[in-house]
Image (cartoon, grey):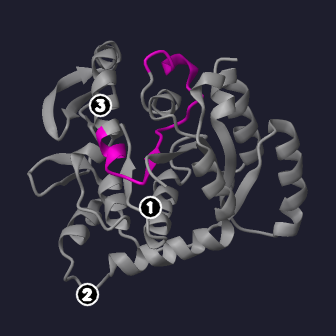
Amino acid sequence: MKNKSIMIQGTGSSVGKSLICAALCRIFTQDGYKVNPFKSQNMSSNFYITKDGLEMAVAQAMQAEACKKEPSVDMNPILLKPLTDKGSQVVISGKAFRGMNAEEYFSFKPQLKHRIADIYENLSNRSDIVVIEGAGSPAEINLKREDFVNMGMAKIAKAPVVLVGDIDRGGVFASLAGTMLLLDEDEKRRVKGVIINKFRGSYELLKPGLRMLEDIINIPVLGVIPYFVHNLPEEDSLCDSLKDKGDDSIDIGDQFDILADVIRKNLDMSKVYKILEEGINDQHMDR
């Protein structure tokens, strides 16, 4: 397997995309593949400083650790550090560029798209598998035109998409079906499976809903991930934990192995590998 990718998108923010990506990074690494994480753009006030003194999102630094790799800004080329409710400092390839308000940044995005594509291609060429994380929701229809974070990134990478919904928030069936409703036809064809995350309750009572959801969206449910308490540090302390490997209070590697084990037990990995192998044929996307 070489130059394969899979993209994890969500019905919204905080549905668990980052941890599912981290788990897949560790699973594929355990299975003997060269794996790298990628998120074209991340917004966070917390950041990780690489050995080269460059800034990147903490989540991708965590995912790099799950791959047993040194974090690199190629894994997160664009970091937006909020300055106000309407503006952020734009960090490009680890270096501060300048502050922009939302409208300025939206107009600036076309200049970044080719750069993102080149960085991704370089990373992919060094990988067997790239695990790509989306941001927010792909159904933000007002932001689609210059998108290189969700479906726009999936198109750049020719990546199949798995959509994640958070059942702990309530309304997971509506959020998954609603997201699919708002996607363009070629975008719908990229979605190869869905995951229901943070489940607690009776699986037997949930099963009829899974079947009905599959009938509505014509996409298989790949797994139901239980709500579980993990010991991975939060973003504020993660930077120090990644750098201080001698800290006996938490073994990051062990925590990734535990996370990977939970995902393996509740996700149909044979279907995930099939999705990876089959990939996407963009020649058929516009039909």
Q: Is residue 210 left or right of residue 237?
A: right
Q: Which residue is mark 3?
A: 118
**First of labels 3, 1 by sequence position:** 1
Residue at the image position 65 percent from the left and 54 percent from the top:
274
Q: CA distance from mark 2 to mark 1?
A: 24 Å
The amino acid at mark 1 is: Cys
Q: CA distance from mark 3 to mark 2?
A: 40 Å
Q: Nearer the viewer, mark 3 or mark 2?
A: 3
- Name the amino acid type tagged 2: Asp
Q: Tell me whether the residue at label 3 lies in contact with that at label 2, contact meaning CB atoms closer than 8 angstroms.
A: no
The magenta segment: 122-146
Above or below, comparing residue 165 to residue 119 in the picture: below
Badge 3 or badge 2: first in the primary sequence: 3
**In this rendering, would 118 be left or right of 278?**
left
Nearer the viewer's eye, disc 2 or disc 1? 1
Quickly name the residue at label 1.
25
Under circle 1, the secondary element is helix
Which residue is at the front of the view, 98 or 272?
A: 272
SS state under label 3:
helix
The residue that mark 2 highlights is 248
Does 181 sit above or below residue 53? above
